Image (spheres, rainbow, N blue to C red):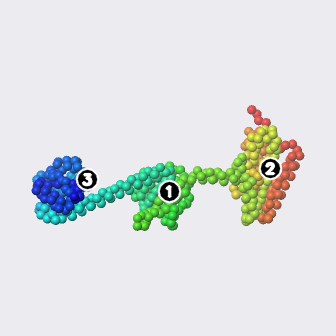
Amino acid sequence: MGRLLRVLMVEDAPDDAQLIVIRLEQGGFDVQFQRVDSAQAMCDALEGSPWDIIICDYVMPGFSGLQALKILKEKGTDTPFLMISGKVGEEAAAEAIRCGADGFLLKGNLTGLVPAVQRGLADAALREQNRRHEQELKDKLSFIQILIDTLPTPIFYNDPNGLYLGCNKAFEEQIGMKRGESINKSIYDILPPDLAALYTRGEEVAESGSGPRSFEGTITCADGEERDVIFYSASFSNSGSTDGGVVGALLDISERKRAETKLRYLSTHDMLTGIYNRAYFDEELERLKKGRKFPVSIVMADVDCLKEANDRYGHAAGDELLKQAAEVLKSAFRREDVAARIGGDEFAALLPNTDEAALVEAMERLQQQLLLSNKEHHGFPLTLSLSTGAATALNGEELSAAWRVADQRMYREKKGRSAGTPHFRQRHISV
């Protein structure tokens, strides 16, 4: 028993149809067929049963092979279609093939019928296989797209010319553009120049070596917000090892950067006053010892009677005096100077490139800022008083000694003041 072949015969002559069936059976097929000779009958047949192949006469009364082929194409059916005619020219055969027929045969020469049917069936099977592969590929791509759309990290991929092939939702939100609007456009078509330059750098990094590459940068998003990101990128290849392009992703590290900045600030600054702390002061002192910014002057300052202020008015009042003292030092000295709180009530300042004459001017500014600050804080019940001392070092070897001298001078001044009454004064504020 041969291979089952279900044939829809579009033929007005029953004898011709029977002759075709005989030829097919001689070729090893077990033929089941239905003959139709009108458009309506053909439509009904197509709706009713699946067919392996359609064999159609070129010319019929009130109907034609080209009309039958058009009906088949309109229904979207990929059934192999063979056209057979008694007498027809080469132009008509070419027209049938152009319209989608799988073959064209003459009724007077059916020796090629079986090979044509076999070829049509094989081509149809190949097309079906290709469709399945395409659908499988579409399904995989759809899954991958859904997968990357769920990720909060912007992801994109470009062809070797830098044109966008695709992206995820996070990338769309970042650039403020829908997916279809970015496809086949370059980075400079859709992003501001500074952000485009960052992406271009990522692509260049990806192309410069094997495997993923990364670097950090700052970008401005579509909403105008600046974000710190790590740019990951890698080149990819198509089948045959041809260059496919670049895939990239941006990891938002803004929160991490803010946390790192905060930690660095806390490690170098006094939490109460906001100026530098003892650890940073010591580091700067060591750095200046090895540097070339001499002469370097050191100023020491101590808040007078802080303990008495805490005991009498509470630690909140004492904290306010410390904050006021820090502001006085910051205002009195230059931007390049380092003012720090190095103890409970002690402050110090490093003044690079400051000789003794410049130090005298700096100390005068300190006293002026102290007077000005007390005027500005006239509503506060305590007056800030500072004991100070200063010294100048001409080189690194003298710097530690200058610190000790400045500290001794400060304590001599403080000791002289402590022999009298406490030097914080309570303001009398009229209510």
Residue that appears at 70% across and 53% down: 268
The image quarter in which residue 350 lies = bottom right
Precedes in sequence: disc 3 or disc 1: 3
Precedes in sequence: disc 1 or disc 2: 1
Neighbourhood count class around disc 2 (C-alpha, 10 Å): few under 14, some 14–19, many 20 upward: many
Separation of disc 1 and disc 2 at Cα? Answer: 54 Å
The residue that mark 1 highlights is 249
Identity of the amino acid at label 1?
A: Ala
Identity of the amino acid at label 2?
A: Asp
Depth order, front residue of 343/148: 148
The residue that mark 3 highlights is 77
Secondary structure under tag 3 reads: loop
Residue that appears at 12% across and 63% down: 108
Secondary structure under tag 1 reads: strand
Identity of the amino acid at label 3?
A: Thr
Disc 3 or disc 1, which is closer to the eye?
Answer: 3
Taking the image as shown, residue 284 lies to the left or right of residue 7, namely right
